[in-house]
């Protein structure tokens, strides 16, 4: 029996009450131009181009970093069909092996995982965490240093976003009257979140089989108990004062590590996504003297309630506030918060830099990149003498796309600079947020104190300084007039031309009603499920892409179009299945994206709760063109009461030749964690939370999935390695 989801999405509710980008404004902008011209959309675009605005149809400039003469890949595998099996399905000629499952030990001193909920909680400090998510492969040289082209041995860095407590403990969480009564279970959960670094090696040269080194000196867990430094403009400011570090220089732990990123100097970036929900703050019993700004910030970031895992409820607490640090209420008498954890929420929501090659190093929360529901941080084209750029999505409904641009130009001499290079490039830069305009252009608006509406005079939230701006980046983005998107997930940068792709995973009818469609989020429809449980809004999501002006990643304007719309193949071709998907490639809820530097293939993983009546989540391979290869399109949407026409820009249809299903995962999983060896011959993906949607029947050991161990085993999130039987590059 499938109950309602055990773990409903924590990001379903919008906390964005700003008035940014409403359909009316977009419509009026278009209408006035069209009326002015007395012509259609094409004429409008031509005129805008002539007026000096970006031309959505111009070929983008190719940055120097792009590989000159790079061939356009051709997909070279036989597609797989949709599947509801409890198995990983791959094309003929491909194989996979299970590399690293939740609970697997990363030290010789730790025993095999029992997978019955009885493993010693403390042992989780040296076991794989749960819910494997974003991941990156760093080649490891024989000298123990980063070797960029090492494809047989590497350090795999991966996130553990969350937990499935039903499988982690004997019978799920032990809770009485809203209180966690088993401190051991909570300790196990503290360790099961965070990051793993594990050395990974191909066992036989060219043989395609991989294993992890259980005793590697590089193996490491970073979790909710790890000491982490705060760096950048918000470090050592009043916003960061806690009892743990009254000088605001540090915090303890990282949580809800979703997707990730990397740097040109070989460090890993882990990104804190739905951190807000872990904190306890019950407004009715908090100190009534919380400031008006604090209250605005709590509401905007969704800090409310008991805390999703009830971590703050364990008693007695121990001297170093192991549990109480998840309590964001004002309990102490101090003015600054140095005697409680009222400011603890400000120490979460960051991009965290980890040096996997320095196991004793302290991770750094890089506050210059802003505080929000960070999905990940994706590096733009790297070019000597040009700034470094990271693209970042804030994954909640109605949230924004950001980018960070370093002030220091990239110097290749820093390629082995470790965390010191991070200090140079990640603590000193500019934070921008994206506005998608109706004419196919867009603007990056800087979030800087004193610029635009990001000032002390901003009525919704008067900013005090730049630390306030980065700590409250979502409020700054509201003030800047950014465009609300349909839940930005991963980004990926095309190595051939520097164009940036961003998954907009889905939207529901309440957060994207018909009246609030805009050019970049243009669909409202009813997704008709075979089960009759229809969903309305944009439940299948889309992938948007943009080309920076002049091919410069640091540019402040861009042109965009919608690369791909998720849909059932059977959906209406005019209003829903606009990308012409067929049974070979239809999908819903794009999330993970990865451009293979080796092959140029764009991999698309799904995290779907809409098309799951027909298929489990999947991985597709795409060969994209470029921004502007399609054209303008008018999409007419209806909510059954009224209808609206929205003009947008849509990429050229890909067809089965250029978009094809490569893999389908086991039951109730998400496909994520895309990473690859530099030679493109091993693809690592994560199967996250198989079986998460079905209430377990412990008595009969029947679970929503038994993958990967089979039989009556509890399901386990796991990393798999995909290789080709002939040893070739994946996907082509
Ligand atoms: Fe953790 Fe937005 O996925
Ligand atoms: Ca995701
Ligand atoms: Ca997702
Ligand atoms: Ca998930």
Image: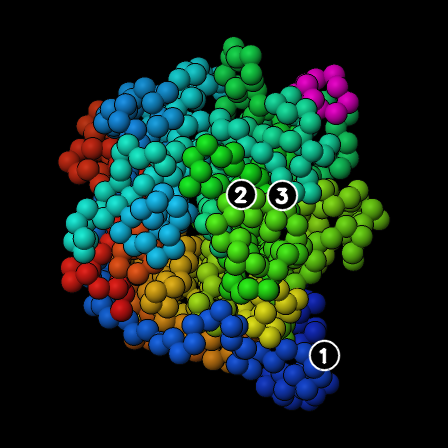
**Viewer-side label of 3, 1:** 3
Nearer to us in this view, 259 or 534: 259
Residue furthest to the top: 316
- Residue under circle 3? 367
Of labels 2 and 1, the one closer to you:
2
Relative to 722, say whether 717 is above or below: above
Mark 3 to mark 2 CA distance (whole Å): 14 Å
Estimate the x, y position of residue 702 in percent, counting from the top left.
Answer: 21, 33
| CB-based contact (under 8 Å), mark 3 and mark 1 | no
Q: Which residues are magenta?
A: 331-341
Say which label, 3 or 1, has the lower sequence index.
1
3 vs 2, front mark: 2
Residue 728 seen anywhere in this rendered image of the structure: yes
Mark 3 sits near ligand 1, with its Cβ under 8 Å away:
no
Residue at mark 1: 32
Q: Let me know if residue 333 is in the magenta part.
A: yes
Identify whether 145 is placed above or below 244: below
Please give left or right for residue 686 compared with residue 223 in the image: left
Q: Nearer the viewer, residue 93 or 642?
A: 93
The answer to whether one can see residue 632 in this image is no
Answer left or right for 537 relative to 234.
Answer: left
Give the spatial CA distance, label 2 vs label 1. 51 Å
Question: Which is the main secondary structure of the residues drawn in magenta?
Answer: loop
Q: Give coordinates of residue 535: x percent, y percent.
A: 44, 54
Q: Residues within 10 Å of mark 3 (few under 14, many from 20)?
A: many
- Choose the circle earlier in sequence order: 3 or 2: 3
Residue 309: percent from the left, percent from the top? Answer: 47, 28
Labelled pair 2, 1 in contact (Cβ < 8 Å): no
Which residue lies under the disc numbered 2?
A: 419
Q: Quarter of the image for the N terminus: give it.
A: top left
């Amino acid at each position: 029996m499938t109950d309602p989801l055990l773990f409903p999405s924590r990001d379903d509710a919008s906390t964005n009450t700003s008035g940014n980008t409403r359909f009316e404004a977009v419509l009026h902008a278009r209408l006035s131009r069209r009326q002015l011209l007395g012509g259609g959309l094409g004429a409008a675009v031509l005129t805008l181009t002539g007026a000096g605005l970006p031309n959505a149809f111009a070929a983008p400039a190719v940055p120097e970093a792009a590989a000159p003469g790079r061939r356009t890949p051709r997909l070279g595998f036989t597609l797989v069909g949709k599947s509801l099996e409890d198995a990983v399905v791959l094309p003929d000629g491909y194989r996979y092996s299970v590399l690293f499952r939740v609970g697997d030990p990363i030290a010789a001193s730790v025993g095999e995982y029992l997978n019955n909920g009885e493993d010693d909680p403390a042992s989780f400090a040296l076991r794989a965490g749960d819910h494997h998510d974003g991941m990156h492969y760093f080649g490891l040289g024989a000298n123990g240093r980063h070797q960029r082209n090492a494809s047989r041995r590497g350090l795999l860095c991966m996130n553990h976003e969350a937990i499935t407590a039903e499988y982690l403990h004997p019978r799920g969480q032990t809770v009485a009257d809203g209180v966690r009564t088993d401190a051991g279970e909570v300790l196990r959960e503290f360790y099961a979140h965070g990051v793993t670094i594990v050395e990974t090696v191909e066992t036989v040269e060219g043989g395609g089989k991989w294993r992890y080194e259980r005793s590697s000196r590089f193996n490491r867990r970073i979790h909710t108990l790890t000491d982490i430094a705060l760096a950048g403009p918000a470090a050592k400011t009043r916003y960061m004062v806690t009892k743990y570090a009254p000088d605001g220089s540090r915090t303890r732990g990282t949580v809800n590590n979703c997707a990730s990123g990397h740097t040109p100097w070989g460090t890993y970036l882990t990104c804190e996504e739905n951190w807000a929900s872990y904190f306890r703050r019950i407004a009715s019993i908090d100190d009534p003297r919380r400031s008006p700004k604090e209250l605005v910030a709590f509401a905007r970031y969704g800090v409310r309630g008991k805390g999703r895992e009830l971590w703050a409820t364990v008693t007695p607490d121990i001297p170093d506030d192991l549990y109480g640090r998840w309590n964001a209420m004002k309990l102490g008498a101090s003015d600054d918060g140095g005697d409680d954890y009222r400011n603890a929420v400000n120490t979460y929501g960051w991009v965290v830099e980890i040096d996997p090659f320095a196991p004793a190093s302290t991770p750094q929360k890089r506050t210059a990149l802003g505080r929000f529901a960070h999905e990940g941080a994706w590096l733009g084209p790297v070019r000597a003498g040009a700034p470094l750029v990271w693209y970042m999505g804030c994954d909640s409904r109605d949230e924004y796309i950001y980018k960070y641009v370093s002030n220091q130009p990239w110097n290749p001499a820093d390629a082995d600079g470790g965390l010191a290079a991070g200090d140079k490039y990640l603590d000193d830069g500019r934070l921008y947020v994206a506005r998608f305009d109706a004419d196919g252009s867009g603007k990056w608006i800087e979030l800087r104190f004193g610029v635009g509406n990001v000032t002390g005079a901003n009525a919704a939230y008067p900013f005090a300084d730049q630390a306030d701006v980065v700590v409250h980046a979502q409020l700054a983005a509201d003030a800047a007039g950014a465009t609300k998107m349909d839940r930005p997930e991963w980004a990926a940068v095309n190595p051939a031309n520097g164009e940036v792709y961003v998954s907009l995973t889905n939207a529901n009818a309440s957060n994207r009603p018909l009246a609030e469609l805009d050019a970049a989020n243009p669909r409202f429809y009813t997704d008709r499920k075979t089960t009759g449980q229809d969903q309305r809004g944009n439940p299948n999501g889309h992938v948007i892409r943009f080309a920076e002006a002049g091919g410069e990643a640091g540019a402040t304007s861009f042109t965009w179009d919608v690369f791909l719309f998720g849909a059932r193949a059977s959906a209406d071709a005019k209003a829903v299945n606009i990308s012409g998907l067929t049974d070979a490639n239809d999908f819903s809820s794009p999330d993970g994206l990865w451009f293979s530097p080796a092959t140029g293939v764009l991999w698309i993983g799904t995290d779907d709760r809409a098309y799951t009546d027909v298929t489990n989540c999947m991985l597709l391979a795409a060969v994209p063109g470029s921004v502007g290869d399609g054209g303008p399109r008018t999409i007419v949407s209806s909510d059954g009461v009224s209808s609206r026409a929205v003009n947008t820009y849509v990429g050229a249809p890909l067809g089965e030749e250029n978009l094809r299903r490569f893999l389908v995962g086991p039951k109730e999983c998400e496909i994520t964690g895309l990473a690859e060896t530099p030679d493109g011959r091993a693809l690592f993906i994560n199967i996250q939370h198989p079986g998460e949607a079905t209430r377990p029947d412990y008595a009969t050991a029947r679970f929503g999935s038994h993958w990967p161990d089979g039989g009556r085993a509890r399901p386990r999130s796991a990393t798999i390695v995909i290789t080709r039987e002939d040893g070739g590059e994946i996907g082509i």
